Amino acid sequence: MELILWRHAEAEPGEPDSARELTPKGQRHAARMGAWLDRKLPPACRILVSPATRCIQTVEALGRRYEVVEALSTESSAEAIIEACGWPEHRQPALIVGHQ
């Protein structure tokens, strides 16, 4: 299984943390990275995203279908993230859009 990690683009400060939105600079960076990834990712790639607003805004720049996964939130452990994407058993490549 190929596992690709994409950290959300630059976000505004604020509370609640889950509702923070991308800055204009973050929107531009997400668009550029999304265009690049769209050319590189295989068509069958599973795209899993944190429920945080900034992560959803980041993945939407990719222009592909995605699944919001609660286990990818800011409070999740590495083990929970790995389990959520089915690594290493799942054969399909996966892109995770999340946090640092």
Image (spheres, helix red, strand yellow):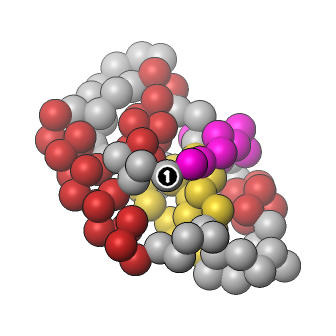
Q: What stretch is highlighted in magenta?
A: 65-74
Residue 97 in percent (x, y) is at 51, 53
Furthest-top residue in view? Answer: 15
Closer to us: 10 or 15: 10
Whether residue 17 is visible to the viewer of this picture, yes or no, is no
Q: Does the magenta stretch include residue 69?
A: yes
Specify whether 9 is left or right of 79. Answer: left
Decide if residue 67 is on the left or right side of residue 42. right
Determine the image quadrant of residue 92. bottom right
Give above or below for 14 relative to 56.
Answer: above
Residue at 63 percent across and 70 percent down: it is 44
Q: Could you say where residue 31 lies in the image, as x and y percent from the top left? A: 25, 50
Q: What secondary structure is found at the residue carrying circle 1?
A: loop
Quadrant of the snapshot with the N terminus? bottom right
Residue 28 belongs to the span the image colors magenta = no
Residue shown at 39% from the left, 25% from the top: 20
Q: Is residue 100 above or below residue 42?
A: above
The residue depicted at 33 percent of the width and 57 percent of the height is 34
Q: Determine which residue is flagged by label 1.
A: 64
Front residue (pair 56, 38)? 38
Left or right: 72 with respect to 25?
right
Estimate how packed mark 1 is, as few (under 14), some (14 to 19) or many (20 or more) residues with alpha carbons within 10 Å. few
Q: Where, by quadrant of the figure, is residue 67 drawn?
A: top right
89 to 9, vertically: above or below: below
In the image, taking residue 41 as reference, residue 92 lies left or right, namely right
Q: Would you identify the image quadrant in which residue 22 lies?
A: top left
Q: Which residue is drawn at 15% across and 41% down?
A: 25
* Residue placed furthest toward the front: 43
